[in-house]
Amino acid sequence: MERHRHKNLRPSGQVFDGFIFGMWNASSKEECDSEENLAFYLKDRNYPENCAGCIQPYADSPLDGEQVGEEVYIIMVNKAERYCYFMRTYLIITDELAHALSLASKRGVDVRIVTHGIPDKKPIYRVMRSFYNEPAENGVRIFEWKPGFCRAKMSVADDRLATCGTINLDYRSLYHHFENGCFMTDVPDILSIKEDFDETFKQCREVTEKYSIKWSVPHRLSRMIIRLFAQLL
């Protein structure tokens, strides 16, 4: 069973179209970047101005040397004052993101991460669980969704910041993939995302205590060996 309960807001406009053309140019011998070729796709889109807040689509490319997806997540964590929740398929995080999560938890922010309780690939699941320890030791709460495989990729903080899109918390997604998402501030849908998290927590098992303890030397050694392959996953 996979989890797709919350509707994803599809990125649109020039950011989304630029994301598609970036993928095209990376895999095609024929570049599609002239104004004549792009004019049909990059059309003006007029949106009503009577809505609250802001929704900003963004894209992340492995070709520009800038980790937009990771930077958005770190900014969200740093801005959070009360809580910051993440729901992700995989948790194979970078040192920078792990540090930001730990600092937020230490300053009193309720930081929670939801992953899946039933894996699609057991070796990757073992690697992912090896990344639970550092956040859990620093007060980040880790949850596993019991009904099945969690495919959702959402974040929410303080009822006023949220993201929704394709960007996971793993090396491939943050550094090697073409990804896209929507960053939301002060829009009504943020409360719907928060409600979805609250319902999800009821279906999860919390494993924070299990992974917050100091493990034995053999276990820590095996964890270090497993992590050697983390950037390939």
Image: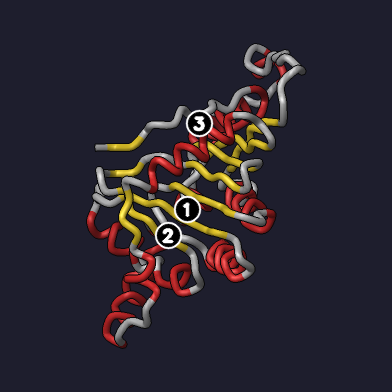
Mark 3 or 1: the one toward you = 1
Q: Is residue 65 visible?
A: no
Q: What residue is drawn where x is 64% and y is 12%?
A: 40
Position in image of residue 171 (x %, y %): 47, 56
Identify residue for label 3.
28
Residue 169 tag number: 1
Position in image of residue 9 (x %, y %): 54, 27
Q: Are marks 1 and 2 in contact (CB under 8 Å)?
A: yes
Q: Earlier in the sequence, mark 3 or mark 1?
A: 3
Q: Amino acid at mark 3?
A: Ser
Estimate the spatial distance between the alpha carbons at disc 2 and disc 3, rounded to whole Å.
30 Å
Instruction: Specify the quadrant of the image occupied by residue 161.
Output: top right
Position in image of residue 156 (x %, y %): 56, 44
Q: Earlier in the sequence, mark 1 or mark 2?
A: 2
Position in image of residue 60 (x %, y %): 59, 42
Identify residue for label 2.
92
Q: What residue is drawn where x is 57% and y is 66%?
A: 105
Q: Is residue 163 visible?
A: yes
